[in-house]
């Protein structure tokens, strides 16, 4: 294994991670809910009148983050190499599968592991495994 | 006074949680799909950053959820709703496995997708729209299954 020391950013990774943990902490300790984006967004697709506002508010906060960031500093580099067609395919796959498996990186990966849920630990192992395999196949077997 | 999740105070906490979550993603470099893919590329020039993001998040989250598990009501007086399902079933594992494929193809998962939307990236828009369509397809399939079994 070859570590890319030039791009490895341990301190901002830890600090950013701690903020993500803080957001999840505030959400469960004040609103009583799991900060899982799949669940928050998915719930909007089977709307109950008194169940919409807090979901929309969370998503507005998330989407507004780059605006607030830019008040203080320029955004860091963002690079998306995937084609539009591949993004659409991946978007569909992610949408269906995260709802089917009851969560994604935030709900299972962060909140689920934080509360030591065996279900979330297994789900995280599952998507990490295929994430690694997919990149291996795409980059090193198909050579894309 | 019985509070509701749509009370203005709760909405402010929802908004703030989403905002802090997004700022954390940007600071951590996780709003950059190339950096996420560099973590998933074990056989290439490996960038372990995402592992530390998870570590930092879980370290803080663990404390919060340890407190949350002992309480019935949140600090705003709202019911704390933690998942009760403990069964590791086919849906969970299959869903996770397939999600990993989508994630590995482009390096975007649901939370960073919304940050990319906020950045105004057209590619972010495409991902979010198709992801929501995917979730809609899931709802339709579930509804069909329910009406079949009636």
Image (cartoon, grey):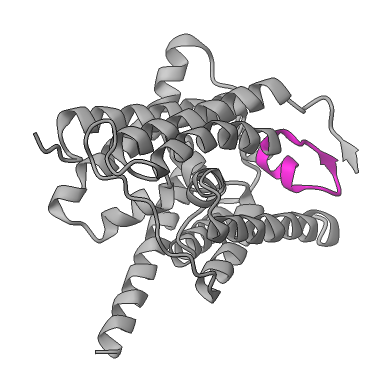
User: Hey, which residue is sitting farthest right in the picture?
Assistant: A1
Whole-percent x, y for residue B114 in the image: 43, 40
The foreground one among A143 and B97 is B97
- Decide if residue B122 is in sight here: no
The foreground one among B60 and A10 is B60
Whole-percent x, y for residue B8 in the image: 16, 29
User: Hey, which residue is sitting farthest front in the picture?
Assistant: B70
Stretch in magenta: B36-50
Whole-percent x, y for residue A128 in the image: 67, 54
> Is residue B63 left or right of A52 when viewed as pictured?
right
> Is residue A16 left or right of A138 when viewed as pictured?
left
The foreground one among A123 and B39 is A123
> Is residue A98 left or right of B46 when viewed as pictured?
left
Q: Quadrant of residue A78?
A: top right
Q: In the rendered image of this protein, does residue A68 appear above or below residue B97?
A: above
- Residue drawn at the location 53% of the way across and 73% of the way down: B89
Looking at the rendered image, the quarter that the N terminus of chain B falls into is top left
């Amino acid at each position: 294994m070859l570590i890319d020391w030039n791009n490895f950013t341990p301190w901002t990774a830890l600090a950013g991670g701690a903020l993500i943990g803080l957001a999840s902490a505030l959400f469960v300790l004040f609103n009583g809910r799991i900060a899982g984006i799949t669940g928050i967004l998915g719930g909007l697709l089977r709307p109950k009148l008194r169940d919409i506002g807090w979901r929309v508010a969370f998503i507005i906060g998330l989407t507004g983050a780059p605006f607030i960031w830019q008040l203080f500093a320029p955004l860091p580099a963002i690079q998306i190499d995937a084609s539009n067609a591949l993004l659409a395919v991946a978007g569909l796959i992610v949408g269906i599968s995260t709802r089917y498996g009851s969560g994604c990186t935030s709900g299972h990966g962060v909140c689920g592991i934080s509360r030591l849920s065996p279900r979330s630990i297994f789900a995280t192992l599952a998507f990490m495994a295929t994430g690694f395999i997919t990149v291996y196949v795409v980059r090193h077997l198909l050579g894309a | 006074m019985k509070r509701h999740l749509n009370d203005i105070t709760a909405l402010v906490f929802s908004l703030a949680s989403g905002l802090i979550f997004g700022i954390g993603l940007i600071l951590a470099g996780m709003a950059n799909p190339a950096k996420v893919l560099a973590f998933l590329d074990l056989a290439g020039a490996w960038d372990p950053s995402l592992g530390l993001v998870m570590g930092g998040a879980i370290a803080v989250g663990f404390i919060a959820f340890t407190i949350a598990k002992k309480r019935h009501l949140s600090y705003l007086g709202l019911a704390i709703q933690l998942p009760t399902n403990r069964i590791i079933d086919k849906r969970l594992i299959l869903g996770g496995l397939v999600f990993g494929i989508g994630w590995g193809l482009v390096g975007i998962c649901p939370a960073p997708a919304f940050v990319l939307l906020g950045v105004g990236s057209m590619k972010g828009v495409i991902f979010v729209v198709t992801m929501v369509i995917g979730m809609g397809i899931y709802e339709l399939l579930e509804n069909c299954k329910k009406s079949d079994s009636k």
